[in-house]
Image (cartoon, rainbow, N blue to C red):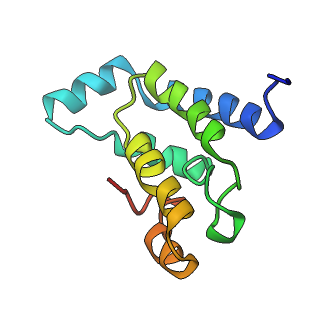
Amino acid sequence: MNFEQTPLQQMVDELAGQILAGEVTPDGLFQLEAAQTWTHHAAYKALAKGELLGVALPESMGGLAGGLLEVCTLLIHVGGHVAPVPVFETLIQGALPVLRYAEPDLAQRVLNGVATGDRILT
């Protein structure tokens, strides 16, 4: 059994770490808490700009055609940086089940905007 990361997983690992380290800082988290804003919109948009929110979506939906392991690689960094971004909710609880169980036309409508960060699923 091969436990090495795939090239896509390596890319997600490196890019997610870079983006979140730059966006999610202790001072920024204190500011969010003080403002009672629980989503770090700038970090979420930065993940979208880096194409990481589309990691599990097919290329036809603007994604990178990854899957659960690629999303988990992203989530390791989300948790490690304590980033208040809805990646788990949108990708694990939303996008992956829709991709698996919805008819293709419904999946296209529901998932439109996920990769760009314009649609959050919960």
Q: Is residue 41 visible?
A: yes
* Residue 33 spot, x, y in % from top left: 19, 28
* Residue 105 spot, x, y in % from top left: 54, 81
Residue appearing at x 54%, y 50% in the figure? 53
Looking at the rendering, which quadrant does residue 42 occupy? top left
23 relative position to 35: left or right? right
Q: Is residue 22 visible?
A: no
Give 48 or 70, whichever is nearer the viewer.
70
Give 119 or 15, whichever is nearer the viewer.
119
* Residue 103 spot, x, y in % from top left: 53, 76
Give the vertical position of 95 relative to 79 (above or below): below
Looking at the rendering, which quadrant does residue 38 occupy? top left
Give 76 or 82, whichever is nearer the viewer.
76
How many marks are shown on the rendered structure?
A: 0
Q: Which quadrant: the N terminus?
A: top right
Farthest bottom residue in view? 105
Give the vertical position of 38 relative to 31 (above or below): below
Residue appearing at x 15%, y 35% in the figure? 35
